[in-house]
Image: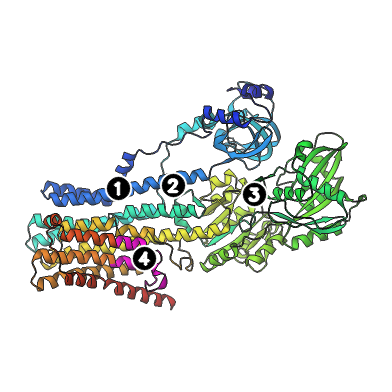
Amino acid sequence: MDDCHSHNTENVFASLHSSPAGLNQQEAAQRLLKHGANALPEKKPVPAWLRFLLQFHNVLIYVLLVSAVISFLLGHLVDAGVILAVVVINSLVGFIQEGRANSALRAILAMASSQAMVLREGVVHAINARELVPGDVVMLQAGDKVPADLRIFYQRDLRCDETTLTGESAAVNKHSEAVAQNTPLALRTNMAFMGTMVTYGSGRGVVTHTGQNTQIGTINRLTQQVTAQATPLQRQLARLALQITLLTIGIALFSMAFGIFIGGQSFADMFQAAIGIAVAAIPEGLPALVTITLAIGVQRMARQRALVRRLPAVEVLGAVDVICSDKTGTLTANAMTVRSLYLAEGMLSVSGEGYAPQGAIAAHHSPAVLERAAQIALLCNDARLAEKDGQWQLHGDGTEGALVSFALKAGLNQNLRQQTPRLDELPFETARRYMASLHRIGAANLLLVKGAPEVILAACDQVLAENGPQPLQPDEWQAAINLMAARGERVLALAFKTLPDTRAQHADMQGGLTLVALLGMTDPPRAEVKEAISRCHGAGIRVVMITGDNPLTAAAIARELGLGDGTVLTGAELDALTPAQLSSRIEDVHVFARTSPANKLELVQALQAGGHVVAMTGDGVNDAPALRQADIGVAMGQKGTDAAKEAAAFVLTDDNFTTIANAVGAGRTVYNNIVKGILFLLPTSMAEAAVIVLAILLGMVLPITPAQILWVNMITAITLGLALAFERAEDDIMAHPPRRPGSGMLNLQFMLRLLLVTATGTAIVFALYLYALGSGHGLEYTRSMAVNGLVMFEAAFLLCSRYLHASILQRGFMLGLWPAAIAIGLVFALQLLFTYLPVSQAVFQVQGLMLHDWLLVIAASALVIPVVETEKFLWRRWRRK
């Protein structure tokens, strides 16, 4: 039915063969097969053949391809063939890894899929939104993303933000009455459309359309093609590639001209030498290295429960110096448990852990009061607990789950909800800070209320005692609230009121309530968070707690975690500060309580104005502005709304602060491994080119032919060059201050290392070549010494490159050595084939080496290790001073 908006709800349900209680599971399964998944049409993936061709779309590869074509035209078939082999092998590596990365990303995005609360045969279920079908009944509340096109049949102050669909900037009030058939889309106020956001109130709707048949699905077909912007890292690497290319071409042309006009060499020989220089100096393995390093980093983060939604976030992570974290569920366990109960007779303790209804309430003399408190806790509540495989699982809000568990400990059963159905309700709203539900209990219509104690106490004029209602003593109950809050407990007040009819209104909350109990709940800090915060402090990262909770509760948790000096600023105090005062106070305060979404945005902006790189956590629809404003937005995967997840760069699947700290370390590792790869590829490539250039300048026979250079590039690019992508995090990765934003990849120290290693490699190759010549060996034998010396030099330098600054002479050197060890073993085996295989000897003009010369090659090549380690030592010593 395409005109559901113009029919009353009875006709809509009839046309969809459904009811307000929802479908049964069998019917839902059949409809899912008929209608398909509730998902928008996905952008068509890039065909495999095009992905392969795109591997060649790089300025470095263009130079190599041009060199191959010219070599072929000049009749140098071996050189042309080896150049093409180098290019194709590198492209295949990138193609295969990109395919794996795409598969991993699809799996990651599937993990972050949206959830929907549906009624199936009258029972609430949390299901993947993809499983929704026409006829399903969906429950909506503030912060939800509407999962399909819905016809509203029940609502309580329901409003939706439909900017994404209609462009209407103001939230739209919803109702359940039919509208005219020709009503424009923006005025169909009895419909909730897929992709829009619930900003206020609650409601229920029946699914009318799913997937590509929804209104936004129609628009989505027109917006499939999106041009991805280059990330800062990609732009940085592209600039580096262009600089390398221009420098290489310049050196090659200079060497060619020098050899022809000054050295008297032939044009053909010098042209081949120039091609050798170009192929040697260009690190063609760099694109594959970066692709693989990023893919491995994203996969590692996913295994650590951090889903990367935007690639630039990986790069920015290394520069974060302030993490603004929510308290509940992030710093704490998100398993609220009622610990204390205050009745008219006094304070009682409640035992038990988590949501499991195992535990007991301390001895008391108020069974009737306790029963009423348990009734309010269970009935004025949208959460439910279910036991599965011996574990109690929560469906709903954590605080409400704690109330259900408390009610079960008090002897009630969740079936009471079916026996005492809800007649009306006042859903929880942030501005009002209470929830109320109306039930027929006994002969009376009772409005059961729970909410912030200061709000509830203000509306109460009496308190329920075992012998009946008594006058309320506010000071006594306020003292109990303060005591509970000082212990770090979250306090909720329970109350009720008898109403004359079956309609609840907010005016009923203005007074006349009877106070029943105070419940004190704790959500203790996660055991591992304190150590994670300590790691962040050691890494130069400041951790700030921003919570909407009570200042006393926030301070108690902060003390346990070692955050700040006990100073707490509230949202009201923040509102009273001038921008100048805020910029001053924000540098000293680590805990902010009773904050609003506007306060969060203000704090992020103030920190950024102070030059900080900020990571911000959030879970609500109102957190989206702060998440977007932050340099890194981090959404909660379990309790986070769709609005928060869409605004964030990361999604934490476990809502755990430790995961943020781990992600920062993983992000630093990704960046470090890319720098390590560049620091390995550039000096070795420059050393290869320097050998040819120096030979031309000295008027010598080339120690290594262009074809041999190509061979070295081919085997090292697919072995040594990629090993660093798999390097684990260095032990001190979280012991350094954050990288400054905008800083270059290669600093002065790294540039000096590049020149030092280039010179060392060139000297090693020439020394071996001259030694072999002096020993009376022929040209093929001497070139075998030189080319094997070049490869062994690169293998030795790989070991040094595993650490940017630390020495390899440490106990942890063997940990994570396997990628480098495998690469070195493989390249050595290939060199044996290169040196002794008759076909290879004929093609590359080499001879087998004697054993003592192999030992000399290995010993000489290893000299790069003390050279680089000495440079690292001097740098560490200088940095300490």
- Who's the residue at 49% across and 33% down the image? 220
Alpha carbons under labels 4 and 3: distance apart: 46 Å
Residue 261: percent from the left, percent from the top? 9, 61
Q: Residues within 10 Å of mark 1 (few under 14, many from 20)?
A: some
Alpha carbons under labels 1 and 3: distance apart: 49 Å
- Who's the residue at 22% across and 65% down the image? 790
In which quadrant of the rendered image does the C terminus lie? bottom left
Indicate left or right for 40 with 547 as reference.
left
Residue at which label 4 appears: 802
Task: Tell me the SS state at disc 4.
Answer: loop
Alpha carbons under labels 2 and 1: distance apart: 18 Å
Q: 662 or 615: which is nearer to us?
A: 662
The disc label shown at residue 104, or none:
2
Identify the amino acid type marked 2: Ala
Q: Of the two numbered discs 1 and 3 on the same chain, state the one appearing first in sequence.
A: 1
Residue 445: percent from the left, percent from the top? 85, 37
Q: Of the two numbered discs 2 and 1 on the same chain, state the one appearing first in sequence.
A: 1
The disc label shown at residue 80, or none:
none
Specify the quadrant of the image occupied by residue 262. bottom left
The disc label shown at residue 390, or none:
3
Task: Tell me the SS state at disc 3.
Answer: loop
Task: Tell me the SS state at disc 1.
Answer: helix
Specify the quadrant of the image occupied by residue 378. top right
Q: Of the two numbered discs 4 and 1 on the same chain, state the one appearing first in sequence.
A: 1
Tell me where the magenta segment starts and ends, as one range. Answer: 796-824
Indicate left or right for 242 with 368 as reference.
left
Above or below, 435 against 757 in this view is: above
Residue at which label 1 appears: 92
In which quadrant of the rendered image does the N terminus lie? top right
